[in-house]
Amino acid sequence: MSETYSMRDPTSEGGPPMRARLTPPATLQGRTVALLDIGKERSDEFLDTVEELLVERQLQVRRYAKPSPATLARHYSAGDIAAECDVVIEGLAD
């Protein structure tokens, strides 16, 4: 006698919508730049240096940080970044 069982597809049932990449602005003047620390080791050091360079150029900068590298965008301030900033620089390091 054979047993029957069902398996579910482990892949996501819904993927993110595909959309065209936005064209970067020609200049950062008049824009607010988000610096996002994703929680990787030493990414804050990289972003500290980037912030210094941007502030020297009299640009508006806002800092954000994920609680850990594994945190998904919808579980932290991604909405705030989109609402408050024009450009994002993400600090990746290992």
Image (cartoon, grey):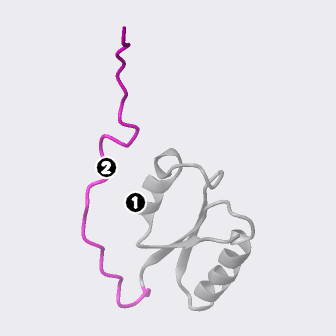
Q: Nearer the viewer, residue 60 or 20?
A: 20
Vertical position of residue 8 compared to residue 33: above or below: above
Q: Residue at x 35, y 36 (%)?
A: 9
- Residue plotted at (56% across, 87% down): 58
Above/below status of 70 relative to 7: below
Magenta span: chief secondary structure: loop
Residue under label 2? 15
Q: Amino acid at mark 1?
A: Ala
Q: In this orientation, which residue lies closer to the viewer: 84 or 67?
A: 67
Q: Relative to residue 57, is residue 37 depicted above or below?
A: above
Q: Residue furthest front?
A: 1
**Crowding at label 1, few (<14), some or many (≥20) Cα neighbours within 10 Å?**
few
Q: What's the residue at 69%, 78% (across, down)?
A: 46
Residue type, label 2 = Gly
- Quadrant of the rendering where the C terminus is positioned: bottom right
Residues drawn in magenta = 1-29
- Residue 86, position as x, y percentages in the image: 40, 72
Confirm whether the magenta stretch covers residue 17: yes
Marks 2, 1: nearer the viewer = 2
Between the residue at mark 2 and the residue at mark 1, the CA separation in whole angstroms equals 23 Å
Q: Position of residue 69 (x, y in %)?
A: 62, 55
Residue 68 is situated, as x and y percent measured from the top left of the image, at: 65, 52
Disc number for residue 83 = 1
Vertical side of 49 occupied by 19: above or below: above
Label 1's element? Answer: helix
Question: Looking at the image, which residue sits at the far top?
Answer: 1
